[in-house]
Image: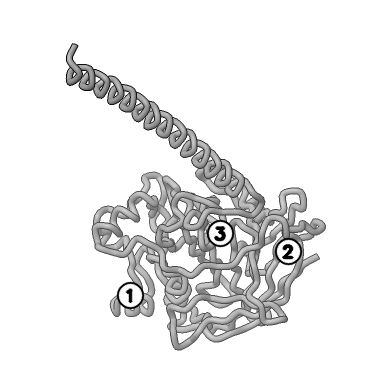
Amino acid sequence: MTMKKLLNKLFKKKLLIALTFFLAAVFGWFLWHKNSIEIIKEKIDISSASLTSADNFLPIGKVSPISGLPCENALRRPMAVMLSGDAVVRPLSGISEADLIINMEVITGSITRLMAVFVCGSPGEIGSIRSARHDFITLARGLDAIYAHWGGSHFALEELAKGVIDNLDALPNRYSAFYRKSGIAAPHNGFTSMTRLFGAAQKMGYRLESEFIGYPHLLSSNIRAGTAKILTINYSSSFKVVYEFDSAANSYLRWRNGKKEIDKNNGQQIAAKNVVIMRAGSRQIDDQYNDVQVTGQGQAVVYRGGEEIVAVWKKDAKNLSSKLYFYDSAGEEIKFVPGQIWIEVVELGQSVVWE
């Protein structure tokens, strides 16, 4: 073998050895890097798990701005639906799934009507639907809600004609947002569902994402339940409301006219986590409609966790889209217990008893 061939053979052998070491190093680096990634990934997953399970932690964007409860629909725009307060329509459908319900007289010293506001819940049936009132429109605007109703007073319809709020009206009933149930006498047979309402709202080009700034809520570690008491709101005759505080469940069980307030959809008694007494003066207009002073400020009392908190409510009269605020005696915005809120709007001198 010539010297040239010998050198060439040795070079190829060294090149093969070098290439083998190089490939081994690359493979070793890949295994190490893969394991490192898995370790880092595992640490991230563990860290995330500890956060999501930690007390009081709720993922951003997954909490209702009204109820403070986690839900998939947290970023969905609130839907404010007008409901009848008449005894003949009870029990109402869908009210246990509302984040917030406002109960207010539509005739001074007489009939009350409800506005149920939905963010998290998607009831398959909501009703009985009733007509719009202008003071409810003002409150709905402060929640950045789409307003759903069946016709309305001429005061309310004049406001809606100005485009002050996105609304769905059952009289024209665009895109079949509402329906009438057979076997129930009109006008008590009007119903809807969240699927129908949001389907119609989408087709009408309404914004579907919420811009409501929300209400503050207590962390679970700060919630304490007081002793059992009864809150009585002396609306007239069959509209009288009683809340029985259940300290074990830290909830206010609702009664109306001596009967449990039941959701017809599931047979459950309404169990509010917060009850607000909002005092507001009113005047009778056109002999059949009420004009409630829901802007400006006034006295309020907030009931949560069995405690009674003397408060003040405020809503900017110059900006009707402003939020309805509740402040304690120190001027701090009151935090609610996560869960359903009921706001009971009562006359200035109306009897309310907590005992």
Residue designated by label 1:
160
Residue drawn 36% across and 63% down? 150
Residue designated by label 3:
67
**Quick one: 159 or 92, which is closer to the camera?**
159
Where disc 2 sits, the SS reads: strand
Where disc 1 sits, the SS reads: helix
Q: Residue furthest bottom?
A: 318
Residue drawn 20% across and 21% down? 8
Which amino acid type corresponds to the residue marked 3 in the rendered image? Ser
Where disc 3 sits, the SS reads: loop
Labels 1 & 2 near each other (Cβ < 8 A): no
Which amino acid type corresponds to the residue marked 2 in the rendered image? Leu
Left or right for 26, reference 336 = left
Residue designated by label 2:
231
Q: CA distance from mark 1 to mark 2?
A: 36 Å
Which amino acid type corresponds to the residue marked 1 in the rendered image? Leu
Evaluate whether residue 90 shows in this view: no
Q: Residue furthest top?
A: 1
Sequence-first tag of 2 and 3 = 3
Q: CA distance from mark 1 to mark 3?
A: 27 Å
